[in-house]
Amino acid sequence: MARAIVTPDALDCLQRDLCNMNQTTQTGFSMRRLYSAKSLTSIFIPILLLILVASRFNYDWSQTWASLASMDPWFYCFGFVSYYLSFLIRGFRWRVIARNVNVGLSDREELPSVVNCSKLILAGWFVNAIGWFRIGDAYRAYKFARDSRSRFSHILGTILAERALDLATIVAVLVVVTGLFAAEQKSILAFYLLGITVLMLLLLVSVLLLMRFYGIKLVRVLPARFSQAYQGFQNSTLGSFKNLRLLIFLGTLGWLLEIARLYFVIESLGLSISVPLIIIVALGSSILSTVPTPGGIGAVESGVTALLMISLGRPESLAVTLLDRSITYLSVVILGGAAFMMAQLMGNQYSSNEPDTS
């Protein structure tokens, strides 16, 4: 999904902060950060706000709990497996993108495996789930750079390219699906979602075009310590789009697994809604997760519930939202936390592989 653009100044500060992280012991870092008051507060404040907002409405939750109690565990498991298979696809795609920018081709560098790339993505999503402003992407870029002995700015560029590919795929799907949905329903919520996504894509494309046509001029005016980092970031971003057919195929497959997750969640509750709406809600959930709260808490729940209420009643919509978030948020906190701890502990074997912070 779309992310904030990193300026050279911010990139340099972020590099210094991440290198300072590495100077602490791996286990100490992970335990202190994971269970610090700041991290725990970042999780519970949005949850408390959600509870506060929900409590202001006189709503009987008994029907929602009854729907959840009727869940078919097999369909839920299918949704769970579909979701985590998408991480393998994302890991494969990230590895292809990294190869596109020549990561791992030199004797000094080592390209992580598909499984390790997938673990880093999951660990990054965990950091996003407990922290504000989606710092998880910077975290996984740093870990990838460290494990592969490559430059942090180069890997950060591959993540920006990922976002561009994801947004382009989402817009293409939403344009078609929203048209089909409009023939069935008269709600305009799907068009709002499409409009927001198109604006995000246009913003990102504008940034890529500025990098393509004015990047050299920017490099010339930047101080020397920033220009090398920015040039690496730019070259990596713009060079990531080789093997485009394979990247589009992998990206589309990943989104199909995300859609399958929501389909199985809905089926597990014995509910039925149109396929176009399932696609819109699944993609909408991902777009709303870019809101810079921990895991998109607040925006995802309210937005997904509102979209589901186009076709379902409020109790059923809330049941689907809660069950789906048990996969996309709660399980990421648990399993992603395990992947995060594993990345930190296994990082000891790379203790001499400091990433080039240029």
Image: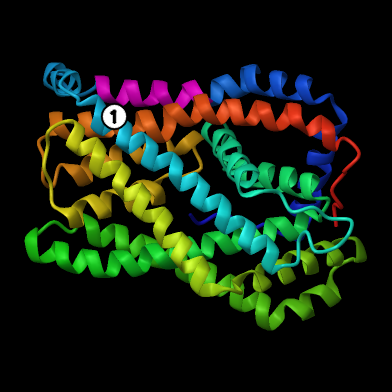
The x and y percentages for residue 301 are: 32, 36
Residue 110 visible in rendering:
yes
The x and y percentages for residue 154 are: 75, 60
Vertical order, 351 against 65 (above or below):
below
Magenta stretch secondary structure, dominant: helix
Quadrant in the picture for residue 328: top left
> Which residue is painted at 32% across and 42% down in the image?
261
The amino acid beneath tag 1 is Leu
Q: Secondary structure at mark 1?
A: helix
Magenta segment: does it hold 333? no
Tell me if 294 is positioned left or right of 321 in this view: right
Vertical order, 260 against 20 (above or below):
below
> Where is the C terminus found, in terms of image quarters?
bottom right
The x and y percentages for residue 125 are: 54, 39
Q: Which residues are magenta?
A: 43-55
Vertical order, 35 against 177 (above or below):
above
Residue labelled with disc 1: 323
